[in-house]
Image (spheres, coloured by chain):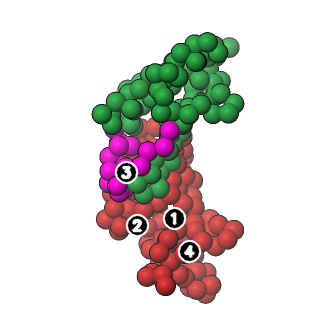
Chain colours: A green, B red
Amino acid sequence: MPRIPQLTDEERTVALGAVPLWRLSDDATGISRGFMFKDFVEAFSFMTQVALLAERADHHPEWSNVYGRVDIRLTTHDANGLSMRDIALAQEIDALLG
Amino acid sequence: MPRIPQLTDEERTVALGAVPLWRLSDDATGISRGFMFKDFVEAFSFMTQVALLAERADHHPEWSNVYGRVDIRLTTHDANGLSMRDIALAQEIDALLG
């Protein structure tokens, strides 16, 4: 039994409205967003901020970086899918970009 | 014309001997290695060290992270393949781990 509740279809629809720049995966288990920065220093500075948010929330991204590009996917393994923890972290990440 | 010379087959064979824990991609354009740490804090601490090495060398990895796992791929876009810059950065990364 997962410890964290997965969002119901109805909850998911409402929650996704709060993070309109994130794309729901085809299997509805996660959300992802790509970010472009002018160079590696800016991209990795952003990643460091995200890392601190993630550690504080004890909720960690699946992510990749190539120079100025950062791709982040959020899913909740303990829920076998999307949970409010993903939505909350996505909102905090969005807020970093002002 | 690429600005950085790609390794010849012979040079590549010799160079790969210096980084035996890295795997040459099937198309021989890059090398990759996976790293496992006990948690996200250790993984991201390692990534921060790699980021500083990469910025100093002006040579940046393609990499991804999921919790304690870090996967790094090194290739030289300006050489359209593997160059000594990849080998040198791989050696520096390996040295971080003692």
Respond whether the residues carrying marks 4 and 1 are from the same subunit.
Answer: yes
Respond whether the residues carrying marks 4 and 2 are from the same subunit.
Answer: yes
* Crowd rating for badge 4 (residues with CA inside 10 Å; few <14, some 14–19, many 20+): many
Q: Position of residue A63 (x, y in %)?
A: 51, 43
Report the disc number at residue B74: 1
Measure the alpha-carbon separation of dots 4 and 1: 9 Å
Q: Are marks 3 and 1 in contact (CB under 8 Å)?
A: no
Q: Is residue A18 magenta?
A: no
Extent of the magenta region: A33-49
In the image shown, does B11 or A64 lie closer to the viewer?
Answer: A64
| Secondary element at image label 3 | loop
Q: Are marks 4 and 2 in contact (CB under 8 Å)?
A: no
Q: Are marks 3 and 4 in contact (CB under 8 Å)?
A: no
In the image shown, does B71 or B20 lie closer to the viewer?
Answer: B71
Please give the residue where the numbered disc 3 appears in the rendered image: A37
Q: Residue at x 61, y 17 (%)?
A: A6
In the rendered image, the quadrant that contains the N terminus of chain A is top right
Task: Residue type at mark 3: give it.
Answer: Phe
| Secondary element at image label 1 | strand
Q: Residue at x 30, y 33 (%)?
A: A98
Q: Position of residue A15 (x, y in %)?
A: 52, 18
| Secondary element at image label 4 | loop
The subunit letter for the residue under badge 2 reads B
Measure the alpha-carbon separation of dots 3 and 2: 17 Å
Please give the residue where the numbered disc 2 appears in the rendered image: B59
Please give the residue where the numbered disc 4 appears in the rendered image: B81
* Crowd rating for badge 2 (residues with CA inside 10 Å; few <14, some 14–19, many 20+): some
Determine whether B67 is above or below A80 in the image. below
The subunit letter for the residue under badge 1 reads B
